[in-house]
Image (tube, rainbow, N blue to C red):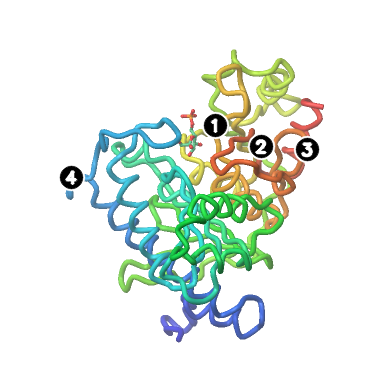
Amino acid sequence: KTKKQNGYKLQTLTSWLLKQEQDGVIESELTIVISSISMACKQIASLVQRAGISKLIGGQGAVNVQGEDQKKLDVVSNEVFSNCLRSNGRTGIIASEEEDVPVAVEESYYGNYIVVFDPLDGSSNIDAAVSTGSIFGIYSPNDDCLSLVDLEDTTTLDNVEQRCIVNVCQPGNNLLAAGYCMYSSSVIFVLTLGKGVFSFTLDPMFGEFILTQENIQIPKAGKMYAFNEGNYQLWDDRLKEYIDHLKEPGPNCKPYSARYIGSLVGDFHRTLLYGGIYGYPRDKKSRNGKLRLLYECAPMSFIVEQAGGKGSDGQQRILDIQPVEIHQRVPLYIGSTEEVEKLEKYLS
Ligand code: P6P
């Protein structure tokens, strides 16, 4: 249903998804999975915005599989995301940044989609109320999953874990849908189903995501760059040359502008709308960079390519990379096509 206001129709995420289903863009089972994800994001938005009040600020006093100190909200957000996915009955396997290994979902009875997610990326910013976000990707159900949830046969438990990993480790080219929800001055849900990029802004008046941008196209070029230059001395010399080039004033005395939030979703969303490039390079301390392929780089690269941009590890398309490990890290350079291609030339 759509709500009329000031003479124009408001389209909600729910009504938009139903339209995609009617148009044959997605199966109704996938609609249910995405709706459950948007429900999780609404709950996380509320938790994030009230963190200081509900004493959800600060550390959990635990370290996750990444070796990162978990924030209280990391743990809660992961539980919210997992519970929403479990209860939709269409999820076969979930793979979270906060879980050591993928989890086969017993409750699923139809669909068996594979969902990878980072429930609260950039959570180190929470205590300072800086933008954070949830990132997700959805892979097609895989027949092997049906047997995976046959947990009665305990002899295959270790196989279940192994086969979960095999089913989850798919290249980004296989993604059916990808998106993120940014918790910032607005709560914005960005989604692609493989036919363009759409954004929905949460209207707190009635708790619905309202369609606000259709077929987002990233500018072909843009003079903003988002790199943590604190790592400059640890970078490859060719990358240093590239960064130095961005600072040259050029004929019109206008060098590039540095913009870095330290939160991938915030830095990516600005890049998607204004153009430019975000990069998290490999360096001497982290040989493969910091960002995870499966639930950060691949979903963001699917989105940016659907918006006409590029996502690269410096040599190849992120979406072409075949993951071999759930929490595998890769360098990420993502944004306007001309900007990413310029960087690739420096690194070639
Ligand atoms: P650094 C947050 O921890 C994150 O995964 C991304 O959201 C962000 O872009 C990056 O790491 C920030 O890392 O090393 O610059 O603090």
Q: Amino acid at mark 3?
A: Glu
Answer left or right for 2 relative to 306. left
Above or below 315: residue 142: below
Label 2, ligand 1: CB separation under 8 Å:
no
Q: Which disc number belongs to residue 333?
A: 2
Q: Nearer the viewer, residue 37 or 346?
A: 37
- Image spot of residue 105 (x, y percent): 44, 63
Q: Give the residue at x 45% y 58%.
A: 154
| Residue highlighted by disc 1 | 290
Query: In whole angstroms, how far apart are the C-alphas of marks 1 and 3?
Result: 21 Å
Q: Earlier in the sequence, mark 3 or mark 4?
A: 4
Per the image, label 1 sits on a secondary structure element best described as: loop
The crowd level at tag 4 (other Cα within 10 Å; few <14, some 14-19, many 20+) is few
Q: Earlier in the sequence, mark 3 or mark 2?
A: 2
Q: Which disc number belongs to residue 55?
A: 4
| Residue highlighted by disc 3 | 341
Query: In whole angstroms, how far apart are the C-alphas of marks 3 and 4?
Result: 45 Å
- Image spot of residue 62 (x, y percent): 30, 34
Q: Nearer the viewer, mark 2 or mark 1?
A: 1
Q: Amino acid at mark 4?
A: Lys
Q: Earlier in the sequence, mark 2 or mark 1?
A: 1
Label 1, ligand 1: CB separation under 8 Å:
yes
Number of on-image labels = 4
Query: In whole angstroms, how far apart are the C-alphas of marks 2 and 1?
Result: 12 Å
Quarter of the image where one finds residue 139: bottom right
Answer left or right for 64 relative to 333. left
Query: In whole angstroms, how far apart are the C-alphas of marks 2 and 4?
Result: 36 Å
